[in-house]
Image (tube, rainbow, N blue to C red):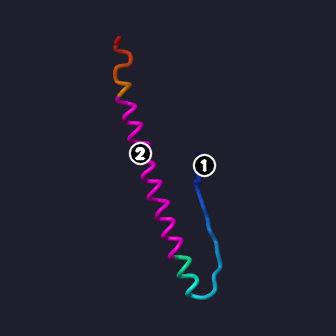
Amino acid sequence: MVTIQHLEVQFDVEGGEEEQLFVSMFNKYIDEWARRQDARRRVNDSMSRNRDLGDGDKGRGR
């Protein structure tokens, strides 16, 4: 898995229409990416908690 800690995007756009289109599309896809990251994090957290439930009997001689 690759984790990006910091991403910087720089661009120069002339004209208002193209800039608005870029901003609109960028926001659409960055929001989608963020939702997927949040969902993935929630699944991983849930899986980790569920694994921890199974570890409760360790060391009790069962």
Q: Which residues are magenta?
A: 24-53
User: Dot 1: what SS?
Assistant: loop
Question: Which callout, 2 or 1, points at the residue further toward the start of the chain?
Answer: 1
Answer above or below: position of 10 versus 42.
Answer: below
Asked whether 39 falls inside the magenta stretch, the response is: yes
- Residue at the far top: name it: 61
Q: Amino acid at mark 1?
A: Val
Q: Position of residue 38 (x, y in %)?
A: 43, 53
Asked which quadrant contains residue 13, the reply is bottom right
48 horizontally vs 29: left or right: left
Which residue is the site of mark 1?
Answer: 2
x 42%, y 36%: residue: 48
Tell me, yes or no, whether the two marked residues, 2 and 1, touch with CB atoms within 8 Å.
Answer: no
Label 2: how many Cα within 10 Å (few below 14, some 14–19, many 20+): few
Q: Compared with residue 21, is residue 53 higher up or lower down, i.e. above or below?
A: above
Q: What residue does disc 2 label?
A: 43
Image vertical order of residue 9 relative to residue 52, above or below: below
Is 18 or 59 nearer to us in this picture?
A: 18
* Location of residue 6 by image quarter: bottom right
Amino acid under disc 2: Val
Quarter occupied by the N terminus = top right
Residue 27 at x, y percent in the picture: 49, 70
Q: Residue 2 colored magenta?
A: no
